[in-house]
Image (cartoon, grey):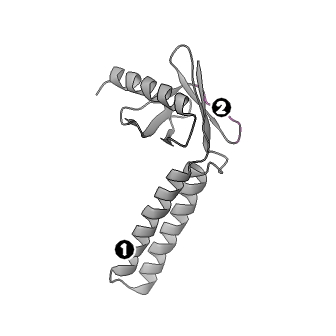
């Protein structure tokens, strides 16, 4: 059994801030009515705050703070609220690289799709390596 505890990622927070900042700059440069520009900038700011709370800083109650892989190759997640899910299905569009893992999961009970973004500062380096190996093995067994 492998339990991977997640921690807030400063790298992911910086990437999100930079991407949203660039998007806000583009909106400011494009010629459009002022009211529409303000709505777009407000929407981007709200999205940034939500993404930082849920994905990068793990402050939201439904943020995923732990991933557990059982001995029978089942994956379950734990949220900051403390709730645990049953078995989760790893979706085929999960992305795994040496520096980044984007895990797309479907909860078996609710059929809800959840996403976990992991960078090297999100967890212990050995746990990150083991999880990437398991995900690559799991993805190779999935139908295309």
Cα–Cα span, label 2 and label 1:
40 Å
Residue placed under numbered mark 2 in the picture: 84
Observer-nearest of 91 and 57? 57
Whether residue 108 is visible = no
Disc 2 to disc 1: CB gap under 8 Å: no
Few, some or many residues within 10 Å of mark 2 (<14, 14–19, 20+): some
Relative to 136, residue 102 above or below? below
Q: Position of residue 140 (x, y in %)?
A: 33, 23
Q: Residue furthest bottom?
A: 34
**For residue 121, which numbered disc appears in the image?**
none
Tell me what residue is drawn at x 61 percent, y 45 percent.
63
- The answer to whether residue 85 is magenta is yes
- Front disc: 2 or 1: 1
Left or right: residue 99 versus residue 55 is left
Tell me what residue is drawn at x 55 percent, y 14 percent.
71
Predominant SS along the magenta part: loop
Whether residue 39 is visible = yes
Answer with mark 2 or mark 1, whichever residue precedes in sequence.
1
Figure quadrant of residue 23? bottom left
Tell me what residue is drawn at x 53 percent, y 13 percent.
72
Observer-nearest of 11 and 134? 11
What element does badge 2 sit on?
Answer: loop
Can you say which quadrant of the picture contains the N terminus?
top right
**For residue 26, which numbered disc appears in the image?**
1
Relative to 98, residue 143 above or below? above
What is the magenta range?
A: 81-86
Left or right: residue 91 versus residue 45 is left
Figure quadrant of residue 33? bottom left
Q: Position of residue 74 (x, y in %)?
A: 52, 20
């Amino acid at each position: 059994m492998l339990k991977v505890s997640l921690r807030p990622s400063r790298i992911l927070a910086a990437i999100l801030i930079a991407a949203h900042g660039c998007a806000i700059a583009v909106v400011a440069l494009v010629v459009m009515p002022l009211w529409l520009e303000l709505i777009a900038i407000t929407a981007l700011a709200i999205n940034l705050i939500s993404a930082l709370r849920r994905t990068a800083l793990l402050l939201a109650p439904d943020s995923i703070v732990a991933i557990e892989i059982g001995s029978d190759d089942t994956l379950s997640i734990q949220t900051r609220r403390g709730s645990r899910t049953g078995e989760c299905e790893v979706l085929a569009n999960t992305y795994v690289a040496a520096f980044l893992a984007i895990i797309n999961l479907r909860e078996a009970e609710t059929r809800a799709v959840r996403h976990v973004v992991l960078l090297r500062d999100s967890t212990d380096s050995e746990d990150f390596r083991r999880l990437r190996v398991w995900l690559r093995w799991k993805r190779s067994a999935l139908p295309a």
